[in-house]
Image (cartoon, rainbow, N blue to C red):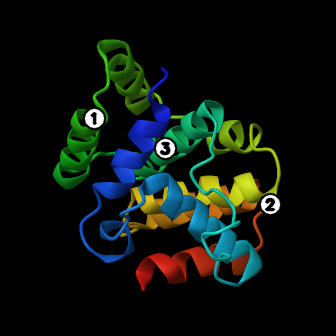
Amino acid sequence: MADSRRMVDALVRSRRGGLAAGAALGGLALIGGLAFRALRGTPPPAATGGPDFTAVDEDEARLMLRAMVAATTADGMIDAAERRRLDAAVAEAGLDPDGRSWLEGELASPAEIDEIADRVAGPDAAARIYAAARLAIDPDTLQERQFLKMLAEALDLPADVADRVEHEIAA
């Protein structure tokens, strides 16, 4: 599926209200900015000469998408609001039939946390994957909160980094 970047972007922007609603630069930029601030505890450098937060390759975008799907299914069900968000993101991303089939397969059998973590290369990517998973859900169940905790641990993400991501999203 070559549409992972568009799908991640659409899923993030499909969130209503808060930080994600203002993602004028796109979902990938929001994820990258969150990860940057969480790791460094500072705002990103000015747009001139700063990092390009949308420079995520297709493999990492697919891993983000897999983490987002796993987070969405962590409580064992996809509620009506989550389904509407997924459907809206699929439509916005313009997924072809193969992409839709891949996503449905992923929803039916989501990736395991260790499977996701094993494919992450370095702390920057770990923070981006965690931020993407957190943006995918409103952790309103014990299972979703446990999923995020276990994902952070598997990614070797320091607790203060995960806390900063949470704080930024909740603000």
Q: Where is residue 53 in the image (x, y as percent from the top left)?
A: 60, 57
Q: Which of marks 1 and 2 is in front?
A: 1
The amino acid sitting under disc 3 is Ala
Q: What crowding class fits label 2: few (fewer than 14 Cα within 10 Å), some (14-19), or many (20 or more)?
A: some
Q: What element carries label 3?
A: helix
Q: Which residue is drawn at 49% across and 44% down?
A: 70
Q: Quickly name the residue at label 3.
A: 70
CB atoms of marks 3 and 2 within 8 Å = no
Q: In this view, does 121 lie to the left or right of 110?
A: right
The amino acid sitting under disc 1 is Val
Q: How far apart, in angstroms, are the residues tagged by discs 3 and 1?
A: 16 Å
Q: Residue at x 39, y 60 (%)?
A: 137
Q: Residue at x 32, y 25 (%)?
A: 95
**Residue 34: quadrant of the picture:** bottom right
The amino acid sitting under disc 2 is Asp
Q: Which residue is drawn at 72% across and 81% down?
A: 160
Q: Position of residue 63 (x, y in %)?
A: 60, 38
* Chain-order first, disc 3 or disc 1: 3
Q: Is mark 1 on a helix, strand or loop?
A: helix
Q: Which mark is residue 90?
A: 1
Q: Where is residue 153 in the image (x, y as percent from the top left)?
A: 73, 61
Please name whichever residue, 46 or 110, is drawn nearer the observer in this view of the structure.
46
Q: Which mark is residue 156?
A: 2
Q: How far apart, in angstroms, are the residues tagged by discs 3 and 2?
A: 18 Å
Q: How far apart, in angstroms, are the residues tagged by discs 1 and 2?
A: 31 Å
* Chain-order first, disc 1 or disc 2: 1
Q: Is mark 2 on a helix, strand or loop?
A: loop
Q: Is residue 171 left or right of residue 118?
A: left
Q: Residue 145 carries which label?
A: none
